[in-house]
Amino acid sequence: MQRPRKRPALEPVEPASTAWLASHLPAAGGVLRQGPRRPLRSLVWLVALLVVLASILSLQSIVRGFYPNQTLLLGIAFLTVALAYGAYALLVRRFERRDVDELAPGRLPIELLGGIALGGLLMTAVVGLLWLAGVYQLVWGRWTDWPHDVRETLGTGLLEELLARLVIFRMLACAFRVRPALALSALIFGGAHLANPHASLISALAIAVEAGLMLAGFYLLTGRIWLSVGVHAGWNFAQGAIFGAPVSGMPSDGSLFRSVPDGAFASWITGGTFGPEGSAVAVAIGSSAFLATMASLKRKTRLQRLGAG
């Protein structure tokens, strides 16, 4: 009897993501069709998508110049995000020649709401551990406008996941496969936050791990964007609206609590003025969530193969 071949020891992402990658490559004839020039076409298509979507999203800035009312601006923000998602779906159908499964609405409610809850729990764990370690103080605040916080964090999650995961990560995966795309898209996402107030190289690397990798992992696991959007929104909502900490360096006003880091500790421990997501604790929790997601993806793929066999 022939002995089964032993699996390679390191197989966390690529084999499990092969089916995902195949489902995100179009049939013959699309812009991402098979061929020696597909990596180049993928990168050109990445730029084209970003240009179109950024042009639509820039309408927010135009409206802001004429109508500075915050409620109106939030409404316009959601309208432009909806237009951007619609444009993405139309472009993918037309030029990639496939169904836009990553925006399939059937699982939207459960994945979005579940993601919001999960993101909130993850950030609660970050702040809770910092508080238990004596690194942070928590005092009661005054939550003045929670509906605004809900709309803002959800809008940010929708916008950033559209660009970072559906365009940048997906196109890099088509060009270079999934493992390099995970690393490259995470570095791009972290680097984009270097322009934020109080940012540093350490905070950018932290964002690259706990957002760039973790959120891409949720997208890989489900094949849809809704869980990533939910976790992104829940993470930001808990950090800013509930715990009153800066969100990626942006100050939070009117929160349930106020989180105050102890200045006696180094900023890489507390996150400093950038916020708790710049802390070592956040990096540890984000990377743990990513590794757990990759383990779930590997197990899911193995079960699918057994079912197919």
Image: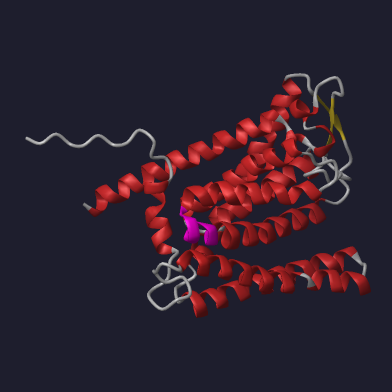
Instruction: Please indicate whether residue 148 sits to the left or right of residue 40 in the image.
Output: right
Is 84 on the left-hand or right-hand side of 248?
A: left
* Vertical relation: 263 (above or below) 17: above
Based on the picture, tell me whether residue 176 belongs to the magenta stretch: yes
Question: Vertical placement of 101 versus 137: above or below?
Answer: below
Query: Which residue extends farthest front?
Result: 36
Residue appearing at x 51%, y 63% in the figure: 102
Horizontally, residue 154 falls left or right of residue 272, namely left
Q: What residue sits 41% from the left and 63% below the top?
A: 23
The colour scheme used to paint the residues is secondary structure
In the rendered image, residue 176, in percent from the top left (x then y), is placed at: 48, 56
Q: Position of residue 52 (x, y in %)?
A: 67, 74
Magenta-drawn segment: 170-177
| Residue 297 colored in magenta in the image | no
The N terminus, quarter of image? top left
Is residue 276 placed above or below 109 in the rendered structure?
above
Q: Which residue lies most toward the left here? A: 1
Which is more toward the observer, 285 or 234?
285
Q: Position of residue 197 (x, y in %)?
A: 85, 45
Corner quadrant of residue 268? top right
Look at the picture and state if 95 lies above or below 210: below
Is residue 301 shown left or right of residue 77? left
**Residue occupying image coordinates x 52% and y 66%:** 40
Residue 231: percent from left, percent from top: 62, 48
